[in-house]
Image (tube, rainbow, N blue to C red):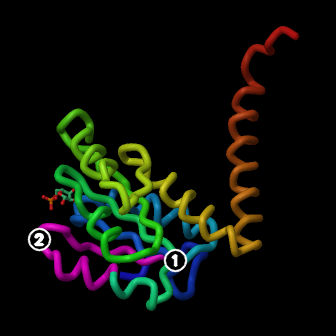
Amino acid sequence: MPAGDGMGAAGRPRVGIVCGSRSDFPVMEKAVALLAELGVASELRVMSAHRTPELVTRYAETAAQRGMEVLIAGAGGAAHLAGVLASKTLLPIIGVPIPTQVGGGLDSLLSTVQMPRGVPVATVAIGGAENAALLAAQIMALHDDGLRERLAAWRRRMTEAILADESNAEPLPD
Ligand code: RP5
């Protein structure tokens, strides 16, 4: 399904956000929203390394020709989605380990991050969908000046929000 429209990022999706299950949406929709805030259109899809392996393969093999620049994959448990995508495309893949009942998602983290030499997945923190979106945007900003400026402004707003909170606290001695 298309994602990002109505949130400031219409147009052809540049980032494919893939979930192993609809149950991953509450985490992965944060990536959709942050990319939209940065003016980057994305698409949110559901496919599983184990339950629909042919679909995952076809998605990865056709992603570049469909205009995707980066893929973000969120999966939990035996989380092989990011790795399988990475095995079938040269696009950068960012893995988001989904929180689970096993050590808060330690199973997802290890099965996403422990890729063999030669097939990398850039893995963010457990549940770190927003950082995945930011990293995807930073990759695309290498050849997109407007996006680089929007990222810089986003980071400035983050810093200012923290400093505004801190301005209400007791001043530190010089
Ligand atoms: C993974 O299994 C999915 O990414 C999800 O995090 C987990 C559970 O899936 P459901 O049983 O909720 O479909 O493949």
Quarter of the image for residue 141 reads: bottom right
Image spot of residue 15 (x, y percent): 48, 74
Using the image, determine if residue 31 lies above or below residue 7. above
Q: Is residue 115 left or right of residue 141?
A: left
Q: Nearer the viewer, residue 21 or 166?
A: 21
Q: Which mark is residue 69?
A: 1
The circle on residue 21 is: none
Q: Earlier in the sequence, mark 2 or mark 1?
A: 2
Quarter of image, res 117: bottom left
Determine if residue 4 is in view. no
Query: Where on the image, by quarter, is ligand 1?
Result: bottom left
The answer to which quarter of the image holds residue 9 is bottom right
Quick one: quadrant of the C terminus?
Answer: top right
How packed mark 2 is, by other alpha carbons closer than 10 Å (few <14, some 14-19, many 20 or more), is few
Is 39 magenta? The answer is: no
Specify whether tag 2 is near ligand 1 (CB below 8 Å).
yes
Q: Are there few (<14), some (14-19), or many (20+) residues within 10 Å of tag 1?
A: many
- Amino acid under disc 1: Glu
Q: Secondary structure at mark 2?
A: loop
Q: Position of residue 76 (x, y in %)?
A: 23, 53
Between 9 and 152, which is closer to the camera in this rendering?
Answer: 152
- Residue located 32% across and 63% down the image: 82
Residue at horizontal 18 percent and vertical 39 percent from the top: 101
**Residue sitting at 26 percent across and 38 percent down?**
106
User: Which residues are the magenta region?
Assistant: 42-60
Left or right of 54? Residue 131 is right
The x, y position of residue 79, in whole percent, is: 23, 55
Quadrant location of the N terminus in the rendered image = bottom left
In the rendered image, which residue does mark 2 sit on? Answer: 51
**Outermost residue, front side:** 117
